[in-house]
């Protein structure tokens, strides 16, 4: 931080920085996010921000929890926005810290618009979305030249906590070779059944990544027809990401964390060389 070739922006009193904390590992914070943590008077953080990240805040900083978790008592969004406005009007430097990226199923847009309405100055600090960075930690890329040139990101539950009924699951099933589903565990049986009903192969590989990029990360590789039952059997808990598609097979060659523990990786996880030899 002391040898940067550029200047970090001043975190002015009365400002709110809407900031992404990344998927969990504090090493995946952006420089702006770390600077914000070291400068803030107040950090208002959500349920997906790892404790090790909060420990980077400057001494004396007020840490205020404002987590929203499906199916559990949570502060209302309007109340969170009002707290940000109140602290800013008191002249505090306010860091609103969200897991992943604030604008990827993070309601960052709602909070930013509330600040605009209240006349509060703010900065947007993007973060690494868990749907990309978290899967990468598990050795699963969201795109790969030999498997897909498109990917779809969806949420597994809507504002009311139920499976989204405003999504065209048929179009998603037919049109997207890779589907990344946030917050899918609760409705995974319904979602997988819907995708199969719309034509997806029941044997298509599925990866489930829990607590991505943290010390408690768990990864389950299964199939579309078995994923819901396997999640229950393996005790996989939220927060979890679900990815559907051939890219999941690449984990056999890209599980870099597993390799550190002795796993032998394969250079041809898609078995394309074997297919060409026998074709």
Image (cartoon, rainbow, N blue to C red):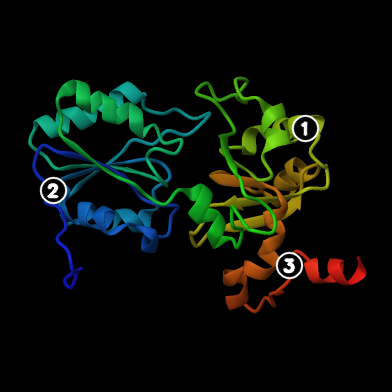
Q: Position of residue 170 (x, y in %)?
A: 72, 28
Q: Which residue is mark 3?
A: 269
- What's the CA distance linking mark 3 and mark 2? 47 Å
Task: Please indicate whether residue 139 sits to the left or right of residue 105 in the image.
Answer: right
- Single out the residue that lies furthest toward the right: 278
Q: Residue at x 71, y 51 (%)?
A: 234
Label 1 with label 2: CB-CB less than 8 Å = no
* Label 1 crowd (10 A; few <14 / some 14-19 / many >=20): some
Which label sits in the foreground, 3 or 1? Answer: 3
Which quadrant is home to the N terminus? bottom left
Q: Which mark is residue 11?
A: 2
- Of residues 117 and 212, which is closer to you in this image? 117
Q: Is residue 276 above or below residue 247?
A: below
Q: Is residue 26 above or below residue 81?
A: below
- What's the CA distance linking mark 3 and mark 1? 27 Å
Please tell me which of labels 3 and 1 falls first in the chain. Answer: 1
- Of residues 203 and 145, which is closer to you in this image? 145
Q: Position of residue 151 (x, y in %)?
A: 60, 44
- What's the CA distance linking mark 1 and mark 2? 48 Å
Task: Please indicate whether residue 241 sits to the left or right of residue 35 in the image.
Answer: right
Q: Which mark is residue 193?
A: 1
Q: Position of residue 247 (x, y in %)?
A: 67, 55
Q: Is residue 82 visible?
A: no
Q: Residue at x 15, y 34 (%)?
A: 121
Q: Residue at x 19, y 37 (%)?
A: 122
Task: Please indicate whether residue 68 sits to the left or right of residue 85 in the image.
Answer: right
Which quadrant is home to the C terminus? bottom right
Q: Secondary structure at mark 2?
A: loop
């Amino acid at each position: 931080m002391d040898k940067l070739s550029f200047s970090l922006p001043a975190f002015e009193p009365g400002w709110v920085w809407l900031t992404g904390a990344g998927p969990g590992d504090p090493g995946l914070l952006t420089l702006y996010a770390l600077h914000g943590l070291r400068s803030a008077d107040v950090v208002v953080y959500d349920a997906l921000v790892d404790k090790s990240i909060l420990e980077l805040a400057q001494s004396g900083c007020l840490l205020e929890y404002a987590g929203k978790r499906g199916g559990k008592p949570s502060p209302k969004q309007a109340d969170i926005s009002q707290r940000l406005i109140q602290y800013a009007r008191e002249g505090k430097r306010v860091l609103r810290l969200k897991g992943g990226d604030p604008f990827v199923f993070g309601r960052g847009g709602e909070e930013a618009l509330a600040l605009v309405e209240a006349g509060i100055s703010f900065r947007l600090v993007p973060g690494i979305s868990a749907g990309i960075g978290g899967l990468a930690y598990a050795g699963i890329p969201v795109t790969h030249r030999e498997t897909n040139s498109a990917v779809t990101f969806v949420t597994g539950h809507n504002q009311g906590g139920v499976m989204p009924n405003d999504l065209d699951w048929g179009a998603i099933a037919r049109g997207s070779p890779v589907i990344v589903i946030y917050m899918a565990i609760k409705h995974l049986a319904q979602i997988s059944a819907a995708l199969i009903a719309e034509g997806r192969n029941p044997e298509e590989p599925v990866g489930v990544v829990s607590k991505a990029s943290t010390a408690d990360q768990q990864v389950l590789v299964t199939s579309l027809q078995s994923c819901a039952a396997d999640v229950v059997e393996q005790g996989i808990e939220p927060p979890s990401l679900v990815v559907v598609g051939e890219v999941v097979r690449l984990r056999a060659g890209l599980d870099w964390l597993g390799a550190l523990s002795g796993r032998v990786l394969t250079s041809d996880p898609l078995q394309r060389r074997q297919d060409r030899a026998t074709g």
